[in-house]
Image (spheres, helix red, strand yellow):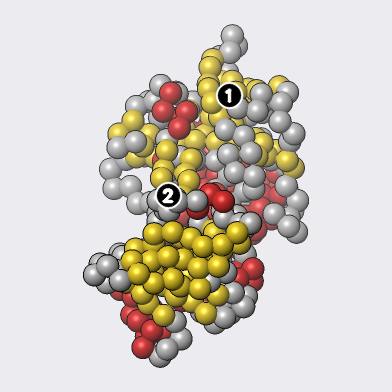
Amino acid sequence: MAGTMVETVPPGGRHETDVIIVGAGPVGLFAVFELGLLGIKARVIDILDHPGGQCIELYPEKPILDIPAIKSISGEGLTRQLLEQIEPFGAAFHLNEMAIGVEKTDDGKWRINTDMGTSIEAPVICIAAGGGSFQPKKPPIPGVDDYEGKSVFFAVRQREKFQGKTIVIAGGGDSALDWTINLQPIAKKITLVHRRPDFRAAPDSVEKMQALVDAGKIDLHIAQIDGLKGAGGEIEAVETTTKEGEKRDIPCDTLLAFYGLTMKLGPIAEFGLNLEENRIVVDTEKFESSVPSIFCIGDMAHYPGKLKLILSGFHEAALMSHGAFHYVFPDKKLKFQHTTSSKDLQAKVT
Protein backbone atom coordinates (compact mmCIF):
# COMPACT_ATOMS: atom_id res chain seq x y z
CA MET A 1 0.00 0.00 0.00
CA ALA A 2 1.11 3.53 -0.69
CA GLY A 3 3.09 5.07 2.14
CA THR A 4 3.95 1.78 3.79
CA MET A 5 6.98 -0.34 3.02
CA VAL A 6 6.08 -3.90 2.07
CA GLU A 7 8.80 -6.27 0.91
CA THR A 8 7.19 -7.87 -2.13
CA VAL A 9 9.14 -10.83 -3.46
CA PRO A 10 9.15 -11.48 -7.23
CA PRO A 11 7.52 -14.82 -8.15
CA GLY A 12 9.60 -17.95 -8.50
CA GLY A 13 12.60 -19.28 -6.64
CA ARG A 14 13.04 -21.27 -3.44
CA HIS A 15 12.74 -19.67 -0.01
CA GLU A 16 12.95 -20.72 3.64
CA THR A 17 11.37 -19.20 6.71
CA ASP A 18 9.97 -20.15 10.12
CA VAL A 19 6.23 -19.83 9.37
CA ILE A 20 4.38 -19.60 6.07
CA ILE A 21 1.22 -17.52 6.46
CA VAL A 22 -1.41 -18.11 3.78
CA GLY A 23 -3.51 -14.94 3.64
CA ALA A 24 -2.58 -11.26 4.04
CA GLY A 25 -5.81 -10.02 5.61
CA PRO A 26 -5.84 -8.28 9.00
CA VAL A 27 -5.58 -11.55 10.95
CA GLY A 28 -2.67 -12.79 8.83
CA LEU A 29 -0.91 -9.45 9.24
CA PHE A 30 -1.36 -9.45 13.02
CA ALA A 31 0.02 -12.99 13.09
CA VAL A 32 3.28 -11.55 11.70
CA PHE A 33 3.41 -9.26 14.74
CA GLU A 34 2.67 -11.97 17.31
CA LEU A 35 5.19 -14.32 15.73
CA GLY A 36 7.75 -11.54 15.52
CA LEU A 37 7.51 -10.87 19.25
CA LEU A 38 8.63 -14.47 19.77
CA GLY A 39 11.54 -14.14 17.34
CA ILE A 40 9.75 -16.11 14.59
CA LYS A 41 10.14 -15.02 10.98
CA ALA A 42 7.31 -15.25 8.46
CA ARG A 43 6.56 -15.13 4.77
CA VAL A 44 3.05 -14.27 3.60
CA ILE A 45 1.28 -15.59 0.49
CA ASP A 46 -1.85 -13.94 -0.90
CA ILE A 47 -3.78 -14.28 -4.14
CA LEU A 48 -4.46 -10.53 -4.20
CA ASP A 49 -1.90 -8.01 -5.41
CA HIS A 50 -1.92 -6.10 -2.10
CA PRO A 51 -2.25 -6.82 1.63
CA GLY A 52 -5.55 -6.29 3.39
CA GLY A 53 -7.73 -9.17 2.21
CA GLN A 54 -11.49 -8.65 2.38
CA CYS A 55 -11.02 -5.34 4.22
CA ILE A 56 -9.50 -3.84 1.09
CA GLU A 57 -11.58 -5.75 -1.44
CA LEU A 58 -15.00 -5.26 0.11
CA TYR A 59 -14.95 -2.22 2.37
CA PRO A 60 -11.72 -0.20 2.11
CA GLU A 61 -13.52 2.97 3.21
CA LYS A 62 -16.45 1.51 5.14
CA PRO A 63 -16.04 2.10 8.90
CA ILE A 64 -15.14 -0.84 11.15
CA LEU A 65 -16.49 -0.20 14.64
CA ASP A 66 -15.48 -3.20 16.76
CA ILE A 67 -11.68 -2.96 16.94
CA PRO A 68 -10.84 -2.45 20.65
CA ALA A 69 -9.87 1.14 21.61
CA ILE A 70 -10.47 2.40 18.05
CA LYS A 71 -13.82 4.12 17.76
CA SER A 72 -13.96 3.86 13.97
CA ILE A 73 -11.48 2.86 11.28
CA SER A 74 -11.72 2.01 7.60
CA GLY A 75 -10.56 -1.27 6.13
CA GLU A 76 -7.74 0.57 4.39
CA GLY A 77 -6.81 2.43 7.56
CA LEU A 78 -6.71 -0.76 9.60
CA THR A 79 -4.55 -2.46 7.00
CA ARG A 80 -2.17 0.49 6.87
CA GLN A 81 -1.74 0.56 10.64
CA LEU A 82 -1.17 -3.20 10.79
CA LEU A 83 1.51 -2.92 8.11
CA GLU A 84 3.20 -0.15 10.09
CA GLN A 85 3.01 -2.29 13.22
CA ILE A 86 4.69 -5.31 11.62
CA GLU A 87 7.31 -3.36 9.66
CA PRO A 88 10.08 -3.99 12.25
CA PHE A 89 9.78 -7.74 11.67
CA GLY A 90 10.58 -7.63 7.94
CA ALA A 91 8.03 -10.15 6.70
CA ALA A 92 8.33 -11.01 3.01
CA PHE A 93 5.15 -10.91 0.92
CA HIS A 94 4.44 -13.17 -2.06
CA LEU A 95 1.49 -11.34 -3.60
CA ASN A 96 -0.57 -12.22 -6.66
CA GLU A 97 0.24 -15.86 -5.93
CA MET A 98 -2.00 -18.76 -4.92
CA ALA A 99 -0.86 -21.69 -2.80
CA ILE A 100 -1.63 -24.73 -4.96
CA GLY A 101 -0.03 -27.56 -3.03
CA VAL A 102 1.72 -28.58 0.14
CA GLU A 103 4.13 -31.42 0.79
CA LYS A 104 6.52 -32.70 3.44
CA THR A 105 10.24 -32.33 2.85
CA ASP A 106 12.79 -35.00 3.72
CA ASP A 107 13.77 -33.10 6.87
CA GLY A 108 10.19 -32.89 8.12
CA LYS A 109 9.38 -29.34 7.09
CA TRP A 110 6.51 -28.15 4.91
CA ARG A 111 6.91 -26.98 1.35
CA ILE A 112 4.21 -24.82 -0.23
CA ASN A 113 4.24 -24.32 -3.98
CA THR A 114 2.38 -21.48 -5.69
CA ASP A 115 0.83 -21.10 -9.12
CA MET A 116 3.68 -18.70 -10.02
CA GLY A 117 6.44 -21.25 -9.47
CA THR A 118 7.44 -20.10 -6.00
CA SER A 119 8.50 -22.69 -3.41
CA ILE A 120 8.66 -21.87 0.32
CA GLU A 121 9.79 -24.21 3.10
CA ALA A 122 9.10 -23.85 6.81
CA PRO A 123 8.43 -26.02 9.87
CA VAL A 124 5.02 -24.36 10.34
CA ILE A 125 2.11 -23.29 8.14
CA CYS A 126 -0.54 -20.85 9.34
CA ILE A 127 -3.68 -20.58 7.20
CA ALA A 128 -5.30 -17.16 7.59
CA ALA A 129 -7.13 -17.13 4.29
CA GLY A 130 -10.48 -15.74 5.47
CA GLY A 131 -13.22 -17.64 3.69
CA GLY A 132 -10.83 -18.77 0.98
CA SER A 133 -10.39 -17.07 -2.37
CA PHE A 134 -13.40 -14.99 -3.34
CA GLN A 135 -14.79 -13.24 -6.37
CA PRO A 136 -17.85 -11.09 -6.98
CA LYS A 137 -20.97 -12.62 -8.44
CA LYS A 138 -21.36 -10.95 -11.79
CA PRO A 139 -24.88 -9.99 -12.80
CA PRO A 140 -26.37 -12.04 -15.64
CA ILE A 141 -26.43 -9.03 -17.96
CA PRO A 142 -25.44 -9.55 -21.60
CA GLY A 143 -22.16 -7.82 -22.47
CA VAL A 144 -21.29 -6.76 -18.91
CA ASP A 145 -17.70 -7.97 -19.37
CA ASP A 146 -17.12 -5.28 -22.01
CA TYR A 147 -17.65 -2.57 -19.40
CA GLU A 148 -16.00 -4.16 -16.36
CA GLY A 149 -13.23 -2.06 -14.86
CA LYS A 150 -14.07 0.94 -17.03
CA SER A 151 -17.60 1.98 -16.12
CA VAL A 152 -18.97 -1.13 -14.37
CA PHE A 153 -17.50 -2.08 -10.99
CA PHE A 154 -18.19 -4.73 -8.35
CA ALA A 155 -16.39 -3.00 -5.46
CA VAL A 156 -15.45 0.53 -4.41
CA ARG A 157 -11.73 0.92 -3.75
CA GLN A 158 -11.39 4.70 -4.12
CA ARG A 159 -14.41 6.74 -3.09
CA GLU A 160 -13.14 9.90 -4.80
CA LYS A 161 -13.14 8.12 -8.16
CA PHE A 162 -16.92 8.49 -8.20
CA GLN A 163 -16.97 12.22 -7.53
CA GLY A 164 -19.50 13.91 -9.81
CA LYS A 165 -20.62 10.65 -11.44
CA THR A 166 -24.13 9.68 -12.46
CA ILE A 167 -24.36 6.28 -10.81
CA VAL A 168 -26.73 3.35 -10.90
CA ILE A 169 -26.21 1.08 -7.89
CA ALA A 170 -27.69 -2.41 -8.27
CA GLY A 171 -28.44 -4.71 -5.35
CA GLY A 172 -30.36 -4.93 -2.10
CA GLY A 173 -27.76 -6.00 0.46
CA ASP A 174 -25.47 -4.15 2.84
CA SER A 175 -22.87 -3.20 0.23
CA ALA A 176 -25.44 -1.72 -2.16
CA LEU A 177 -27.12 0.38 0.53
CA ASP A 178 -23.90 1.36 2.31
CA TRP A 179 -22.42 2.75 -0.88
CA THR A 180 -25.68 4.41 -1.86
CA ILE A 181 -25.52 6.29 1.44
CA ASN A 182 -21.76 6.96 1.39
CA LEU A 183 -21.52 8.09 -2.25
CA GLN A 184 -24.63 10.26 -2.24
CA PRO A 185 -22.81 13.38 -0.96
CA ILE A 186 -20.20 13.32 -3.76
CA ALA A 187 -22.07 11.82 -6.73
CA LYS A 188 -23.93 13.95 -9.26
CA LYS A 189 -26.88 11.57 -9.13
CA ILE A 190 -27.57 8.10 -7.71
CA THR A 191 -30.30 5.66 -8.67
CA LEU A 192 -30.64 2.52 -6.58
CA VAL A 193 -32.09 -0.39 -8.55
CA HIS A 194 -33.38 -3.52 -6.82
CA ARG A 195 -35.70 -6.17 -8.15
CA ARG A 196 -38.03 -6.07 -5.15
CA PRO A 197 -39.03 -3.56 -2.44
CA ASP A 198 -37.57 -5.69 0.37
CA PHE A 199 -33.90 -5.28 1.26
CA ARG A 200 -31.41 -7.66 2.92
CA ALA A 201 -29.38 -4.85 4.51
CA ALA A 202 -29.23 -3.71 8.12
CA PRO A 203 -32.45 -1.95 9.18
CA ASP A 204 -30.54 1.25 9.98
CA SER A 205 -29.14 1.35 6.43
CA VAL A 206 -32.59 0.76 4.96
CA GLU A 207 -33.96 3.66 7.01
CA LYS A 208 -31.16 6.00 5.93
CA MET A 209 -31.62 5.04 2.28
CA GLN A 210 -35.37 5.61 2.46
CA ALA A 211 -34.80 8.99 4.08
CA LEU A 212 -32.61 10.00 1.13
CA VAL A 213 -35.35 8.86 -1.26
CA ASP A 214 -38.01 10.81 0.63
CA ALA A 215 -35.80 13.92 0.58
CA GLY A 216 -35.36 13.62 -3.18
CA LYS A 217 -31.58 13.12 -2.87
CA ILE A 218 -31.54 9.71 -4.58
CA ASP A 219 -33.92 7.75 -6.80
CA LEU A 220 -35.16 4.24 -6.03
CA HIS A 221 -36.36 2.06 -8.90
CA ILE A 222 -37.82 -1.40 -8.24
CA ALA A 223 -36.95 -3.33 -11.38
CA GLN A 224 -34.63 -5.89 -12.97
CA ILE A 225 -31.61 -4.79 -15.03
CA ASP A 226 -31.87 -6.41 -18.48
CA GLY A 227 -29.05 -4.83 -20.44
CA LEU A 228 -26.55 -2.02 -20.86
CA LYS A 229 -26.24 0.71 -23.46
CA GLY A 230 -22.94 2.27 -24.42
CA ALA A 231 -19.80 1.75 -26.47
CA GLY A 232 -16.07 1.30 -25.97
CA GLY A 233 -16.52 0.19 -22.38
CA GLU A 234 -18.30 3.42 -21.44
CA ILE A 235 -21.83 2.90 -20.19
CA GLU A 236 -24.57 5.36 -21.16
CA ALA A 237 -27.67 3.76 -19.62
CA VAL A 238 -29.01 0.61 -17.98
CA GLU A 239 -32.11 -1.07 -19.39
CA THR A 240 -34.65 -2.12 -16.77
CA THR A 241 -38.00 -3.90 -16.60
CA THR A 242 -40.42 -3.71 -13.69
CA LYS A 243 -42.47 -6.64 -12.40
CA GLU A 244 -45.43 -5.20 -14.30
CA GLY A 245 -43.45 -5.26 -17.55
CA GLU A 246 -42.72 -1.53 -17.78
CA LYS A 247 -39.38 -0.86 -19.50
CA ARG A 248 -37.18 2.10 -18.67
CA ASP A 249 -33.68 3.23 -19.56
CA ILE A 250 -31.81 4.94 -16.71
CA PRO A 251 -29.02 7.25 -17.95
CA CYS A 252 -25.70 6.82 -16.14
CA ASP A 253 -21.96 6.82 -16.64
CA THR A 254 -21.23 4.29 -13.87
CA LEU A 255 -22.83 1.03 -12.71
CA LEU A 256 -21.95 -0.40 -9.30
CA ALA A 257 -23.29 -3.94 -9.11
CA PHE A 258 -23.37 -5.58 -5.69
CA TYR A 259 -24.72 -9.09 -6.16
CA GLY A 260 -22.67 -10.70 -3.41
CA LEU A 261 -19.52 -12.81 -3.45
CA THR A 262 -18.72 -16.38 -4.31
CA MET A 263 -16.36 -17.85 -1.73
CA LYS A 264 -14.19 -20.76 -2.76
CA LEU A 265 -12.06 -22.85 -0.45
CA GLY A 266 -9.72 -23.49 -3.37
CA PRO A 267 -6.55 -25.63 -3.16
CA ILE A 268 -6.60 -25.52 0.66
CA ALA A 269 -9.28 -28.21 0.44
CA GLU A 270 -6.57 -30.53 -0.90
CA PHE A 271 -4.23 -30.04 2.07
CA GLY A 272 -5.60 -33.13 3.86
CA LEU A 273 -7.10 -31.23 6.80
CA ASN A 274 -10.29 -32.09 8.69
CA LEU A 275 -13.04 -29.82 7.36
CA GLU A 276 -16.48 -28.95 8.64
CA GLU A 277 -18.84 -26.60 6.80
CA ASN A 278 -15.98 -25.79 4.43
CA ARG A 279 -13.86 -24.57 7.35
CA ILE A 280 -10.77 -26.05 8.99
CA VAL A 281 -11.39 -27.72 12.34
CA VAL A 282 -8.96 -26.48 15.00
CA ASP A 283 -8.44 -26.81 18.75
CA THR A 284 -8.92 -23.72 20.89
CA GLU A 285 -5.65 -24.01 22.78
CA LYS A 286 -3.26 -23.41 19.89
CA PHE A 287 -5.60 -23.22 16.86
CA GLU A 288 -3.81 -26.21 15.39
CA SER A 289 -5.54 -28.28 12.72
CA SER A 290 -5.84 -32.05 12.54
CA VAL A 291 -2.37 -32.06 10.95
CA PRO A 292 0.41 -31.22 13.43
CA SER A 293 2.25 -27.92 12.75
CA ILE A 294 -0.49 -26.63 10.41
CA PHE A 295 -2.49 -23.95 12.16
CA CYS A 296 -5.57 -22.00 11.10
CA ILE A 297 -6.84 -18.63 12.32
CA GLY A 298 -9.49 -16.15 11.22
CA ASP A 299 -12.70 -16.86 9.35
CA MET A 300 -11.39 -20.14 7.95
CA ALA A 301 -11.01 -21.64 11.45
CA HIS A 302 -13.91 -23.72 12.81
CA TYR A 303 -14.54 -24.53 16.47
CA PRO A 304 -17.49 -24.40 18.90
CA GLY A 305 -18.61 -20.84 19.55
CA LYS A 306 -16.60 -19.40 16.66
CA LEU A 307 -17.34 -15.73 15.91
CA LYS A 308 -16.24 -14.41 12.53
CA LEU A 309 -14.81 -11.17 13.85
CA ILE A 310 -11.45 -9.54 13.23
CA LEU A 311 -10.91 -9.14 16.98
CA SER A 312 -11.47 -12.89 17.44
CA GLY A 313 -8.85 -13.55 14.78
CA PHE A 314 -6.36 -11.35 16.64
CA HIS A 315 -6.83 -13.50 19.77
CA GLU A 316 -6.38 -16.66 17.69
CA ALA A 317 -3.15 -15.27 16.19
CA ALA A 318 -1.64 -14.79 19.63
CA LEU A 319 -2.35 -18.36 20.74
CA MET A 320 -1.27 -19.77 17.37
CA SER A 321 2.10 -18.02 17.71
CA HIS A 322 2.77 -19.68 21.06
CA GLY A 323 1.86 -23.05 19.57
CA ALA A 324 4.12 -22.46 16.57
CA PHE A 325 7.08 -21.56 18.82
CA HIS A 326 7.56 -25.17 19.91
CA TYR A 327 7.87 -26.36 16.30
CA VAL A 328 10.21 -23.55 15.26
CA PHE A 329 12.38 -23.76 18.39
CA PRO A 330 11.91 -27.31 19.72
CA ASP A 331 14.89 -27.01 22.08
CA LYS A 332 13.89 -23.68 23.62
CA LYS A 333 11.54 -22.94 26.49
CA LEU A 334 8.93 -20.28 25.78
CA LYS A 335 9.02 -17.46 28.30
CA PHE A 336 5.81 -15.47 28.42
CA GLN A 337 6.37 -11.71 28.59
CA HIS A 338 4.27 -8.55 28.43
CA THR A 339 5.15 -5.82 25.96
CA THR A 340 4.46 -3.25 28.67
CA SER A 341 7.26 -4.51 30.92
CA SER A 342 9.68 -6.44 28.69
CA LYS A 343 12.54 -4.31 27.38
CA ASP A 344 13.40 -7.16 25.02
CA LEU A 345 9.97 -7.07 23.38
CA GLN A 346 9.93 -3.29 23.30
CA ALA A 347 13.25 -3.30 21.46
CA LYS A 348 11.84 -5.63 18.80
CA VAL A 349 9.02 -3.28 17.81
CA THR A 350 11.05 -0.04 17.70
| Residue at the image position 41 percent from the left and 80 percent from the top | 219
Q: Is residue 256 left or right of residue 164?
A: left
Q: Quadrant of residue 4?
A: bottom right
**Chain-order first, disc 2 or disc 1:** 1
| Residue at the image position 30 percent from the left and 34 percent from the top | 276
Q: Quadrant of residue 329?
A: top right
Three-letter residue code for mark 2: Lys
Q: Alpha-carbon neighbours of circle 1 within 10 Å: few (<14), some, or many (≥20)? A: many
Residue 301, position in %: x, y? 39, 40
Residue 71, position in %: x, y? 51, 72
Is 277 situated above or below 237?
above
| Residue in the foreground of this view, choosing between 151 and 3 | 151
Distance between the alpha carbons at the discs numbered 2 and 1: 29 Å
Residue carrying label 1: 112
- Labels 2 and 1 touching (C-beta < 8 A): no
Residue carrying label 2: 137
| Residue in the foreground of this view, choosing between 142 and 4 | 142
- Figure quadrant of the N terminus: bottom right
Label 1 residue SS: strand
